[in-house]
Amino acid sequence: MPELPEVEITKRHLAPVLGGAMFETVEVTHPRTARHNQGDPSIVVSRLVGRRALGVGRKGKFLTVPLDNDMTMVAHLGMSGRFVVDPEVEVIHTHFRAHLGNGRSVEFVDPRTFGFIAVFDPEEIETSGLARIGADAWENPPGVDTLADSLRGRVAPIKALLLDQGPISGLGNIYADESLFLAGIDPLAPGGSLDAGDLERLLVAIRQVLATAIDNGGTSLDDLAYLLPDGRAGENLNLLLVYGRDGEPCRRCGEIIDRVVIRARSSHFCPGCQAKR
DNA sequence: AACGATCCCTGTTGGC
DNA sequence: TGCCAACAGGGATCGT
């Protein structure tokens, strides 16, 4: 599943291809991929053709491509989206295709269509989902005090608040579980119940989990979900300590990894290392 | 405002 | 073996 590390890797692959390049031709072949531009593919196409991309940025799990006017292309990989650069074979579920002035081409493949590609003007971007998320967990992580401020009084489970992208952005189900395990925090603990020591450990854990995942090419759960932009699988799966390991012994203390459902997402944790308080 | 429930979507998996 | 329900989850939206 694409989370911050996978989106960061995607950004690094796209940046040298898109940076400075002009969109010569653009096709959007699935209305759902254009749903944040009124579900109208022609809006995405007309706003991109002839424009030059200035670079590739990322906030949380959103990719941003500022254009040479005041518009910004925003892309989200959702559950199953990935970009393919200079595709050699035709694949199904390709919903976006762009040929660039530099001779390169970029495709967006997304079987489950949870991802999207949009082009926003400055006013639209202010009301988009991108504007509502918190500081990026990798580039611009909050400090302990800032995180404490945003969690104060919150009674929702810390796991749910991490998934909300509000207090901090970029973590999804895998890396939220991994971070809480490394920090020794019960995923069901109310966000407001965490003290400064907890939050310090959590921020350190998040940094370590993300760094490890980026270094290892991200997490490919199977060969159909997330893949590196060159088509290879990421190698972080075997390094996961709790995600998907329910019923197996904890690699740190030997207790059996448990699973609970929080906000309709499975949460994996070690009852020994992440004791309730 | 905060929080939880529901929905979208398709490839894969598990049970019968 | 074959069929089909259940499952996976990021974010938007809606009800409380």
Image (cartoon, coloured by chain):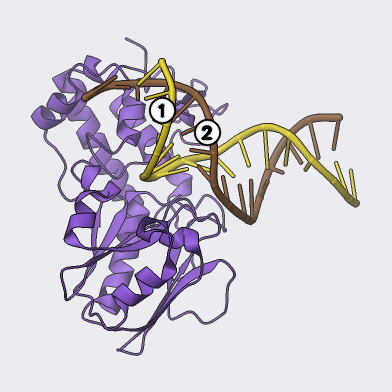
Chain colours: A purple, B brown, C yellow
Indicate the amino acid at tag 2: Arg
Disc 1 on helix, strand or loop?
loop
Chain identifier of the residue bearing label 2 in the image: A
As rendered, which of A34 and A245 lies closer to the eye?
A: A34
Circle 2 or circle 1, nearest the eye = 2
Q: Is residue A137 above or below residue B5?
A: below
Q: Is residue A220 above or below residue C8?
A: below
Disc 2 on helix, strand or loop?
loop
N-terminal of the two: label 2 or label 1? 2
> Residue A134: x percent and y percent?
20, 41
Q: In the displayed structure, does residue A128 sit left or right of residue A114?
A: left
Residue at 21% of width from left, 63% of height from top?
A: A121
Total marks in image: 2
As rendered, which of C1 and A23 lies closer to the eye?
A: A23
Q: What residue is shown with label 1?
A: A252
Q: What residue is shown with label 2?
A: A245
Quarter assignment of residue A224: bottom right
